[in-house]
Amino acid sequence: MRHRSPLPSSVALWAIASVLFLSFEVMAQQPKVLAPHKPVPVRLPDTKTWDKPAVLHTVTGGLWMTDVNFKSFLHVTNNLATDPLTVTPVLYLSNGHRLTLPEVKLSPSGTAVLSINDALQQQGIAPWSSLFGYVEVQYEWPWDAICATVRNTDVVHSLVFAFNLRPSLPAEAQDQKSMDSPSGANIAEGMWWKQESGVIGFVALSNTEAHSVTATVEASDNEGKVFAKHTVKISSHGTKMVHIQEMQGVEGLEGAIRVTYGGARDGLVINGGLEDPATGYSAHLPLDVGFRPRQELSRLSFAALGLMVGAADPMMRFPAGTTFTPYSVLRNISDKPIAVTPAVYWMEGATARVAQLQKLILTPSKTLRLDVSSLLATTALKNFNGSVNLVLDVEAKPGNVLMASGSVDQKNTYVFEVIPQATLESIGKSLSYWSTANGDDTMVTLWNPADEAQDFVFTLLFAGGHYGFPVHLGPRATHMFTLSELIQNQIPDAEGNMIPPSVHEGSAEISGARGEAEAILVAMEAGTYNVQKATCNNYCTTCQGAVSSSVLANPWAVPVARTNQLQFIVVDNHGHGYDYAGSSDWSSTNTSVATVNAGLVSGVSAGTANMDAFVDVADYTQRECLVNEPPVCPVNTGQGGSGGGTVQMPTSLSVVNVTVLPDGPDPPDGCPGSANYGIMIDIKYQVLDQHGSAIQSAAMTPHEKGISFAGSGYDSNIGPQSGYPTSSATTAADGTFHDVPFGVCATGPISAPGRTRTQYITIIMPDGSAPGVRNQTFNVLAPGSQSFGHGSISNSIGDISAQR
Amino acid sequence: MRATLVIFFALILCTLGNAQAGDPERVIRRIVDDGFLEGQDQKVIGPLGDASAVLITKILSDRDLTSQTINNVLVVLGRSFADPTFVAIASDRKPRTALLLLRYLDISTSDVGLKRRIADTRKYIEAHQRAGP
């Protein structure tokens, strides 16, 4: 590994930068940033029933490379906490040849690492062959449920490249994908920079389409002069590698890369890197493919966490004398100037400190390297050894600035890339993979962007268990820790869990202390490094979020003057359901029929209405993993649902059943032996609404009036009746009630035309209204002495008829 | 014994001298006189409890007791104590007058079947009274 002296042009860069920036410390002049403080929804029992069917998902695109030195690994993480998942990896060779690998079974929250070299060998292909291509992983589930990354490591040259696979396209993008564009219509903007003069770039173009695609890769300097142009034709499912060797002859230290291609925008997967095998330098080449999330935002802060400055931390066991220099590279890919205000945060003991730097303007199309070390020297951080967070306040919509950052040692061998990420409110965030195996360790950096303290739980997920690590972060505070520390400490968590020493890999998540669905404001960076191999990997970090939402019950029903509590169920990407009814915005499409507050529907008048719910919770998608550069997460927010229903007014009764009461002297019997002509029955009614649907409410009071069998008037509630347990004052919860005892018992025959009774039934509602539901006349007969012990009853409507 | 009961009921009737003949009395009189019972009657009789026995003594005061009359009285008494929780006046939940009335009915008849029916009614009333509040 050669040591290269600093380039003369970096002096000029610093001269420019020193004009642009004035550093000063500000602790109180920034606008106050608050933690979310939102209600935490109620977690529902896991039902494992989803309102969407399982469909075939395909994650695509991770560039794999093998040769004598390069080892390639596919990391797959099951994001479902509730279910196992079976996935099928597919390798595409550069010539488009397809190799389907054996299925992989992932436990809930489980991870799997497949050696692509080994997989090739099992297919009869020499694992040391110089091959490359891309990967697909297929599985069936209702939503995006896995995160996959290809890690390419050349230990001999200390090169490492990790490429995340692109998740399934949303439906609208699929529609767009089907519309092919003419050649050159799609543009992917990128940027390059040279950490030292030996760095060159490469761009890998993988065609996922069924037809060939032509693409042109152009590299230009910062004056817009194109110094390299390569046009390639990529066969179906093939991959072409374009090495931009011309970069070595370019005087400038940074510039642009542009890829133009035909076909569907998502048809080509573009991955790139910067490398110098001679020094062991390798970095990810940022490329924008036009994905534009959160366009409602006009200003965003991006945080690059844990940039190492100065002498390496002895705890990380780097070779003696290793020092690190942070870097940050920006490119404005819009057509307008963009203002960027940097700030540096660091910890001084337990207190967060900040140095607010002066605003700079990014010129359209230009790439700018910030000399972070020089900037730090203008603050209180001169001669600082440790780590800082570089926060860039960008006055532009997401997607207009490409960013790269990290730390490099003085030999350019240890490259700790840090992916700047937008600081946005979210719920939990996931880390797809961590490792402490074979000399690896994973460094996690958490930063609280809020001006007030927040409490979090960092949860390690591994085969057979989980471990929660509580983290309290003061205002703007940073906490860094390695996962090997957590494992070695062997301290039980709040649930008494410990991490078995045999555990060396898994996934992880950060969430609020009050649960996974708590809204939080946190930035997380995690890098898995290996000091011996001089490698560092960044795996996929995604925001958790909702995958579906619905209003329960749909349809709903509520009687006039009564209430019905609806649930607004949001299912997150883990498969957990939450009821957001109490924390959502609700509205009624017809407030004269029903009003709604926190999901509680109040019936006003008979009719139908929709109850609409909306909650500003993260929408889950993993597209920020790859196609969103730099990551803006969550890419969307807002879950909605609607439930239509009826406000019910009692309109009629249906007869559920009629039971003849048994003979006997006392209640709950019917006719006594001393009055043994006639019949007594128990009539069970169901209250129906204006549509003939059952009104399921216990708050209705059946009332009757008319002329009795004995010929006297009556006007009273139908129940309750002493001695008859089925009788009640109000309806049962299902809206049924019993009219019992009903009928006549006499000491002698009841001859034709019999005894009659008129009955007009109304239902008294809680608001005092009493709609009529039935008007009928009953007739009881028990003619002749042969009717002793017998009788019959029927009504004028014809739905009641019984004999004893 | 019989003379003692007659005196007792005479005293009760004195206390009811000014009682108005409301629906309960009309319903009970119809059942006692005609043996005609309809389901609607339970709403009137059920809440009476021991007050029904008082009303019955008033109705029976001027007539001879036939077997049918006694049977009809038993129907009223049983229905009056079907569920003491329905009896609005707490003092009427205890069948003091009703039990005396049953004893009176018992000694008023020699019909074995009717005596058994009277005994059954007494058991029914006592059982429901014990189950009540």
Image: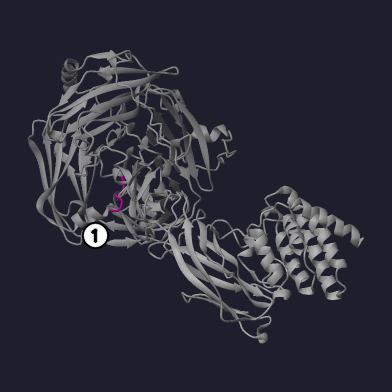
Percent from the top left, x then y, of residue A138? 35, 58
Mark 1, Cα crowd under 10 Å, few <14 / some 14-19 / many 20+, is: many
Residue reaching furthest left? A225
Percent from the top left, x then y, of residue B78? 74, 64
Q: According to the image, what is the colour scheme of the structure? A: one colour
Q: In which quadrant of the rendered view does residue A680 lie?
A: bottom right
Q: Amino acid at mark 1?
A: Gly
Indicate whether residue A236 is drawn in magenta: no
Q: Give the number of marks.
A: 1
Say which residue appears at 81% left-offset and 68% top-offset.
B118
Say which element carries label 1: loop
Indicate whether residue A164 is drawn in magenta: yes
In the picture, the quarter occupied by the N terminus of chain A is top left
B37 left or right of B126?
Answer: left
Which span of residues is magenta-colored?
Answer: A163-168
Image: A565 above or below B104: above
Q: Which residue is label 1 attached to?
A: A96
